Image (spheres, rainbow, N blue to C red):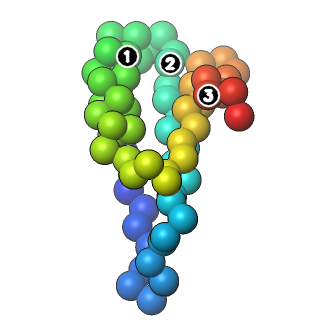
Amino acid sequence: MMVVTPGLDLKPLTNGVDYVYVLDTSGSMSSKLHTLADGVSKVIGKMSTNDRFRIVTFSTQASDLTGG
């Protein structure tokens, strides 16, 4: 897991934030997919109405679940 936050010298965001969730759906993650989906769902539920998100899954190739 990685969290990136802007530095204190940046202006506050007022027009929403863009998030991209990149999810590993390969065979080694099959037993963890429910936990992964639950976590992403909780985070999306806490987003501001101005925020935007995209969900990309990958196994042997990447797929954009949110359709761009």
Query: Could you tell me how far apart the alpha carbons at marks 3 and 1 are, in whole angstroms?
Result: 17 Å
Label located before the other in sequence (2 or 3): 2
Label located before the other in sequence (1 or 2): 2
Q: In this view, does 66 lie to the left or right of 37?
A: right
Q: Where is residue 48 in the image (x, y as percent from the top left)?
A: 39, 51
What residue did someone put label 3 on? 66
Q: Position of residue 53 (x, y in %)?
A: 54, 42
Residue at the image position 38 percent from the left and 38 percent from the top: 44
Query: Could you tell me how far apart the alpha carbons at marks 1 and 2 are, in whole angstroms?
Result: 7 Å
What residue did someone put label 1 on? 33
Q: Where is residue 16 in the image (x, y as percent from the top left)?
A: 50, 60
What residue did someone put label 2 on? 25
Quick one: SS at disc 3?
loop
The answer to whether the residues at label 1 and label 2 have Cβ atoms under 8 Å apart is: yes
* Mark number displayed over residue 17: none
Residue 46 in the image: above or below residue 18: above
Asked whether 44 or 60 is in front, the reply is 44
